[in-house]
Amino acid sequence: MNTNLKISNVTKIYPGCVANDNISLEFNSGKIYALLGENGAGKSTLVKILSGVIIPDEGKIYLNENNLKLNSPLDAKKNDIGMVFQHFNLFETLSVFENLIIDSDEQRESVREKIDAIMKKYNFSIDLDIPVLNLSAGQKQKVEIIRCLIRSPKVLIMDEPTSVLTEQETSELFLSLKKFSDEGILIIYITHKLKEVMQLCDEVAVMRRGKLVSVSEIKNENIESLANKMVGQNLKTIKKKKAKTSSDQLIKITNLNFTSEDPFETNLMDINFSVNRGECLGIAGISGNGQSELFQVLSGEIISEKNSIEFNNNYIGDLSPQERREYLMAFSPEDRLEQAAIPQMKIFENVALNNFKSSNFFNNGLINENKIKEHSKKIISDFNVNTDNIELKSQFLSGGNLQKLIIGRELITSPDLLICFNPTWGLDVGAINYIHETLIKINEQNKSIILISTDTDELLKLSDKISVIHKGKLSKIMNSEEVTSEKLGILMGGAN
Amino acid sequence: MIKIVKRDQPSRAIFFFTPVLAIILTLVAGGLIFFILGFKPFEALKFFFIVPIADKYGFSELLLKATPLCLIAIGLSFCFKSNNWNIGAEGQLTFGAIVSGGVALLFYEQEGFYILPTVILAGAIGGMLYASIPAILKTYFNTNEILVSLMLVYVSKLILDYLVVGPWSNPEGFNFPETRQFSDSAKLPLLFEGLRIHAGIFLALAAVVISWFVFYKTYLGFQMKVSGFSLKTAKYAGYKGKKMIILVFLISGACAGLAGVGEITGPIGQLHREISPDYGFTAIIVAFLGRLHPVGIIFASLVVAITYLGAETAQIFMQIPKYTGQVFQGMILFFLLASDYLLFFKIKFIGLKK
Amino acid sequence: MIIDINFIGLIIASIMASAVPLILASCGELITERSGVLNLGVEGMMIIGAISGFALMTVTGSLIIAIFGAMLAGVLISTIFAFLTQTLITNHVATGLALTIFGIGISAMIGKNFVGIPGKEFPVLFEGLKDTIPLLGPILFGHSIVFYFAFALPFITSYFLKKTKIGLIVRAIGDSPESASNQGINVRLVRYACILYGGAMSGLAGAYLSMIYTPQWIENMTGGRGWIALALVVFSTWNPIKILIGAMIFGGLTIIQFHMQAIGVRIPVQFLTALPYIVTIIVLVVISRDSRKIRLSTPSSLGKSFHKDN
């Protein structure tokens, strides 16, 4: 039976932004549709409306000509719309089986039979009786997919599903999705990755700043044309010039181990690497493989053995972040809103978070507000932060501007080494390009970077050397010319 | 129709207006309770909130009760601002009183200018020692400070009880559960003839000024603010988290200990079984009502102190049970927390749509 | 000295009796916390239950009305907490403290007219069987219905959480209210229910104190048991069966006081009275040292507010 899903004049307005501006779209089963757009284009809002998580201000949804009232996720489920969220909706401490039966009204035994049948059919293999927290990201996604399939959905929506997958897992997923589509399930695939659209989809709808820009067939498009539609301008391609190889070693990590008391964290095992001056070391990996712990060990939030980190001929493994800053290290953590900055505090107060002796922000235990403000103004102008009011609370900065402020705060001290973790996560192309240019510039000034990122393209673009982290272990360090994203994918999946 | 809209930004005006709103709502609800209990609401409220402070003596009593509340609340605001839930100020007060009382008893029937400062210092140290227990257990053993500090309240009261009926009881006291009277040099001077208000109020005022300076002008204050918003950020910035937890507990304990000193070396001049009508717990309300701001805490301590006096007056004149005071205190906190909703949400009244 | 074996049985029975209010309140709070809500108002709800039960018994003369009335009173007062924390999204810790302060005040206010009134005898079950089995007889028989309910409750709670659909939903919400909400579960409704249930159990615990354990009304008669119940939940690492063990330890400490005094051990009475509080602290320290285990068993969303944006 054919499935027809129609979105008609859907609008959703948030204070200060129109997330969906009068969107109308039509989908038919048998095809795989891409919903393409940058971060913040409004794709996620639209699919959350389709899955009943968000209620639109205006507009209607029709499934096979029936007007759907989607006031809750339950309504979407009842109407056979299944959704796999970008951030998994799983219960980590519950078993896989418990996760799967929670929204089912059927008997446990019959659900288990159904699950077994699905797993057999699509070649999934997951232990149903272990807690979800022990699963890899790829397995978690399969759990989410099974959860949808149990209800034999007519529509399956995938929101940025590959952001946590390796190259190999991605192609497996694509095979499954094509199978689902052949079986008559209508697939809507949300992404900002152009390559995936070309690879998988039949039709593509492009969104930009809450508006629908175009709907077209894939065969009439190519990566460049889609990119232009998505960004609204010609994409600048940033290329790093091959840096002159320096052999002047700046930081050396030797036999570094970290065993966490927190079962939700990853242990680090026998980390060894070194970075020379002017070099960018990229660390790839699927999120949750120890990146956060590695960042904290390098920044000093987690203290390690004194001799395990040698920086500029000093052993600093046992120093705190503040003490490491005195040795000219700088840090840009992944979480902008909960770690790198405090949204409820003013811009200049956030600047004071990076405090080192010569900044004179605090003399004899007192706040030197004038000094901090002076410094803040310089950061704002040097790093193109789009405001001139340093008294503004930083929650009013866009993600891009906040990241510029953070990077600016860290770089204005001219550190010898910048350690950053997913610096462009969730940003729009303009901000991403700015950050990338800035990172290239500091390498050119003979300063070094350790770039921990889950974005393989970003790593290939910026790194001189690349290593992959998997389950808390680093792969051997490779020259970036020698690696391809396929090779990285294999390593990210844990192969040697 | 009523529509609730999220505010883009918490409103600053409402931040200071909601405590006032909470007090008003408490009065309304209080009137209602009086009505239910069979009292005339307006008369009861008058006896509760106006009569007690209508004369000089009443006003002195108000300040007498507000002093420990203010002092403890100032100390607690150090903890609360930095995300540390010290709810055992009552125990720190008691232990501070025990230590300072013990020192005062050492100087029994002795006079000297040095005695009072020593007694005061002993109280602060006693409070700090007692507060250091939950602080150390929290930092080094990962133990929940709420439960530990609370349990210690019961322990401190039992220690006090043991001392005043046992080893420290007045040998000539006919087995009353109290110690000997302290010497005059160990007592805080009274400020006015015939009134009970004593020099302890200057300790409270000093705490207000110092805390304001620390909160808004010092690196420590900045670190506390950051830690209060996000411990992750504080860690990333490199602040010494454990040191700060212990420090704020010590400050808080010292303030509570000083409040204890004020209670025993003021008009009473001896240790006895019940040195505090739960000032340590009530001060939690004062700290919140004052928005953890030193000036706000002054006003809040005065407002809450009235509930103590009012309860006594209303009991004498109208036979209203004195626990009504505690009920009012609980209600103030309820209404304050509830009205905080207005900080983040706007309530819009929209005409009925057809 | 010959110790009568039935005397040992009686001591064990009295330990169990003093464990009853702790088990009831802890099991109630455990459900509340499993849904991610930290209600520090147990002491306040318990004392409200104590006065309500006693007052209703005195006024109506009906034990059944009194018991259920006490539970209802616990439900009513916890509704304030639920409304504030779930609808108005207030801080759990501060709201719980307010609840305790408020509860103690209200109970004393109501209780003023009930001080010094003698309580009623509460019927016990299987009285006649007490002497039929040595040692076990006094342990198993001759207790109130609430006593038996309390000792069944940890097992019922465990079954509820592990085996029932609603139990699963409660655990899921405690793990991640966001995911639960996206799955179409009404987080607020379930949390309301869990809070109210916790209130009912605390109310029952209080009623047990004032109607059965020491049948009279004394101001502040809960004396920190509500807080110890909270500590027991941590001690149990959110496992209802372990609450039973913890409550027995604390019951033992309470009973030992009396017997030590009776035997004439020369330890100040205040020290013995302080023992349960000191032991609570020690137990908390010992438990908390295994931070890995605590982290795994603590409901992930415990104490965090959840608000659904539309």
Image: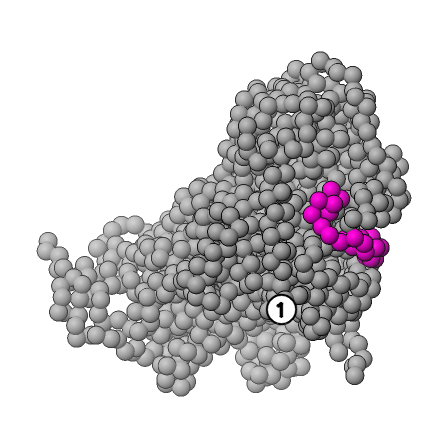
User: Where's residue B214, x and y in %?
Assistant: 71, 43
Q: Which residues are magenta?
A: A193-217
The residue at 39%/47% (across/down) is C283
Give how far across and how far down residue A237 sits, in percent: 84, 34
Does residue A491 appear to the left or right of B141 in the view shown?
right
Q: Residue furthest top?
A: A247
A127 shown above or below C72: above
Q: Quadrant of the C terminus of chain B?
A: bottom right
Provide the secondary structure element on which disc 1 rests. loop
Q: What residue sits 47% from the left and 67% below the top?
A: A106
Q: Which colour scheme appears in the figure?
A: one colour
Residue under the image location 77 percent in, 38 percent down:
A406
Q: Is residue C61 left or right of residue A103?
A: left
The front one of B118 and C57 is C57
Is residue B33 visible in the rendered structure shown here? yes
Examine the rendering and report whether any part of residue B56 can be seen. Answer: no
